């Protein structure tokens, strides 16, 4: 049998390359009568053929299989058409899946038959399942993702060390704070010769002096690169003077430095370069005797001396200066309050609530957290950074009452305080030094929902908020990645590093990621999350997937192993077509996953029935026939079933489409 690819026959193959994230164009229906061939929920229409002479076939194959097997010469005497020609038409439909329609004809020199096969293939129409999302799902496989992660992990990063001196000058008439950062980047143990930094250059107060190597601005705003000299080193000095009572803003407009006599703070963003890799710190603060300081480092032998533990820290270093009294909230959680008056009772209550939800979700043995009070006369301010949160008096009060959060979210309003909770989560998670940024973002986005759940007994409200996160994900990925007026954008999996550069990142991590965490939590699969976060404080000891699966004790060969792998490594979510009907006092239904690519195989065990006068929840059980499920509906006096919901708690990351089947067809 000879397989003839679309490269040889004009118009046979019009599938776009998977690398471009495209979907094959669909030919215009000419209005002629068609035959239909099915592969699962997918179908292809084609002109009628004489199946004695022309054998049609439709299969779903992996991208690699489709790309590597287009042309093969062989004699096949065991088939219905022994020595034959096969003409293929391919549609790259996403999710590493290719739909291949084939027409096979005898290789007997009949040019008219060959011409007919060409025509049938070139004019075939793909029929996508009704309701399918238009966003293109990435074709990157789990093995490709793991190989890319392994290659990245092998390259040792440069060693970064900051020697920072902070001068607090109360007697100065203009400048209160001065910082001097002597930066050393050692490239000698790395194959790299440059490293990216985030640095908000202060045009009026910053002095940059490179003593070895080069420090150069990149085209990306606030991004710089340092380059090693011939010896493999970069050294530079970065000096800043901060005037009294002038707020210094970061790129988002938030105060990152406030220089005041009563309470000075630096959030770590902008007053020195922050590397993309964990960095070591040695800090010396020169302060009057009546002033104390805080920073999330270990105390040194000298007054005002601090240093980072092995492994360093990620991101900017927060520093607070004032006259503080320190208290312990819980093991490894502290609160520092400015002397002179007690902290607001509502702020104190909010701190306890935040501590409680952090400890019950993403706490891990080496993580520490400090709530540090600051003074900001311009209004309430909260700034979170590595290992802590700095807040002005009264700024946390919105977190005390969450009773209206569900109503706000349903109306498309982000409740006041959500960003505070997310920031606090980021301050904890950044201490898991080598945690993947996608995992970190989805965990941080998950904490506001857990905060609401822990501070209310409103189960209906929790369900509504889950559904909001799911809709947020579905709407925005469809809007940006769909086939409307905007170009197609591939949606990458949560475990794929390519998601970091995608415009869909906020919606995949902050929407899908939240519901994935809720689902895993409902299955009690994240009870060992602290062990995973602790394991990611180290650069070695296993690859990405091994660290996750082994830390959570999810072992190969188990259902949970394949489920977790699918949720992290497969793009999109299961799209499930549900067909249901009533028969003999029972609800009967079938469920079919229609998204391209591999199946998620998520199971549902309960179903909510909406009747004319009430709603009930029933256990769903297999009926004995493959793919058919049932539950009893013998509820006299409550009217007929008007609708059903398999995901009524909103906890499953799935998009369901319901079709009610009647005795005469479909409603």
Image (cartoon, grey):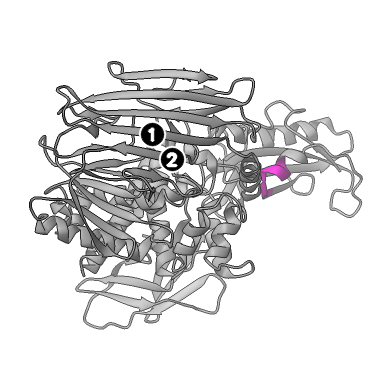
Magenta stretch: includes residue 616: no
Circle 2 packing at 10 Å, graded few (<14), some (14-19), many (20+), is: many
From the viewer's side, name the closer residue of 35 and 179: 179
Residue, disc 2: 281
Which secondary structure lies at badge 1?
strand
**Location of residue 502 with respect to 395 vertically, above or below:** above
- Residue at 31 percent across and 72 percent down: it is 609
Q: Quadrant of the C terminus?
A: bottom left
Can residue 100 be seen here? yes
Quarter of the picture holding the N terminus: top right
Query: Which residue corresponds to the image point at 77% horizontal and 38% vertical from the top-left?
Result: 70
- State whether residue 122 is above or below residue 292: above
What residue is shown at x 43% (from left), y 25% (from top)? Answer: 223
Q: Choose between 577 and 279: the one closer to the eye.
A: 279
> Mark 1 Cα within 10 Å, few/some/many (few <14, many 20+)?
many
Q: Where is residue 221 drawn, in percent x and y?
A: 39, 22
Q: Can residue 663 be spotted in the picture? A: no
Q: Is residue 394 left or right of residue 621?
A: left
Q: Percent from the top left, x then y, of residue 586?
A: 39, 79
**Relative image position of residue 592 (x, y in whole percent):** 51, 60
Q: Which label is found at residue 13?
A: none
Magenta residue check for 61: yes
Q: Would you name the residue on which mark 1 appears?
A: 164
User: What's the magenta region?
Assistant: 58-66
């Amino acid at each position: 049998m000879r397989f003839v690819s679309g490269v040889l026959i004009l118009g046979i193959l019009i599938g776009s390359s998977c690398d471009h994230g495209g979907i094959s164009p669909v030919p215009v229906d000419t209005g002629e009568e068609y035959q239909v061939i099915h592969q699962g929920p997918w179908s292809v229409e084609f002109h009628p053929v004489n199946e004695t002479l022309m054998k049609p076939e439709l299969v779903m194959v992996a991208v690699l299989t489709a790309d590597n097997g287009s042309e093969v010469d062989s004699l096949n005497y065991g088939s219905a058409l022994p020595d034959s020609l096969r003409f293929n038409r391919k549609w790259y439909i996403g999710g590493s899946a290719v739909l291949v329609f084939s027409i096979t004809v005898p290789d007997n020199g009949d040019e008219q038959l060959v011409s007919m096969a060409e025509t049938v293939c070139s004019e075939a129409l793909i029929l996508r399942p009704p309701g399918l999302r238009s966003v293109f799902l990435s074709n990157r496989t789990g093995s490709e993702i793991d190989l890319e992660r392994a290659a990245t992990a092998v390259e040792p990063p440069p060693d970064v060390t900051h020697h920072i001196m902070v001068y607090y000058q109360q007697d100065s008439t203009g400048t209160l704070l001065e910082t001097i950062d002597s930066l050393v980047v050692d490239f000698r143990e790395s194959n790299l010769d440059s490293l990216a930094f985030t640095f908000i250059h202060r045009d009026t107060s910053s002095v940059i002096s490179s003593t070895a190597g080069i420090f150069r601005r990149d085209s990306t705003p606030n991004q710089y690169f340092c380059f090693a000299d011939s010896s493999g080193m970069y050294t530079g000095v970065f000096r800043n003077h901060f005037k009294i009572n002038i707020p210094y803003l970061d790129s988002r407009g938030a105060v990152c430095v406030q220089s005041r006599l009563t309470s000075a703070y630096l959030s770590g963003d902008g007053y020195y370069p922050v590397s993309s890799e964990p960095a070591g710190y040695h800090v010396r603060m020169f302060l009057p005797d009546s002033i104390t300081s805080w920073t999330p480092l270990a105390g040194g032998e000298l007054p005002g001396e601090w240093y980072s533990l092995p492994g360093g820290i990620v991101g900017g270093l927060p520093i607070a200066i004032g006259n503080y009294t320190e208290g312990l909230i819980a093991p490894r959680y502290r609160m520092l309050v400015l002397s002179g008056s007690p902290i607001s009772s509502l702020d104190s209550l909010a701190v306890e609530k935040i501590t409680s939800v952090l400890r019950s979700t993403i706490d891990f043995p080496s993580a520490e957290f400090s709530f540090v009070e600051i003074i900001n006369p311009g209004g309430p301010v909260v700034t979170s950074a590595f290992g802590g949160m700095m807040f002005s008096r009264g700024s946390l009060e919105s977190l005390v009452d969450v009773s209206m959060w569900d109503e706000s979210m349903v109306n498309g309003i982000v409740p006041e305080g959500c960003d505070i909770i997310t920031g606090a989560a980021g301050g904890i998670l950044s201490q898991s030094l080598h945690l993947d940024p996608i995992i970190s973002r989805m965990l941080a986005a998950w904490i506001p929902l857990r905060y609401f759940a822990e501070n209310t007994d409103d189960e209906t409200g929790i369900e509504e908020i889950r559904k909001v996160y799911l809709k947020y994900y579905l709407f925005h990925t469809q809007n940006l990645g769909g086939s409307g007026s905007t170009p197609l954008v591939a949606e990458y999996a949560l475990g794929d590093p390519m998601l970091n550069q995608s415009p869909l990142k906020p919606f995949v991590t902050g929407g899908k990621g939240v519901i994935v965490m809720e689902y895993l939590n409902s299955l009690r699969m994240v009870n060992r999350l602290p062990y995973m976060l602790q394991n990611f404080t180290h650069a070695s000891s296993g690859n990405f997937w091994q660290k996750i699966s082994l830390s959570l004790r999810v072992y190969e060969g188990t259902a949970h192993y394949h489920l977790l792998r699918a949720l992290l490594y497969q793009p999109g979510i299961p799209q499930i077509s549900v067909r249901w009907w009533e028969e003999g006092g029972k609800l009967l239904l079938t469920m079919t996953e229609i998204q391209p690519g591999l199946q998620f195989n998520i199971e549902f065990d309960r179903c909510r029935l909406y009747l004319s006068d009430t709603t009930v929840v029933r256990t769903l059980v297999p009926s004995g026939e493959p793919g058919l499920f049932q539950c009893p509906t013998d509820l006299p006096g409550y009217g007929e079933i008007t609708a059903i919901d398999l995901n009524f708690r909103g906890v499953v990351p799935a998009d369901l489409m319901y079709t009610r089947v009647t005795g005469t067809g479909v409603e």
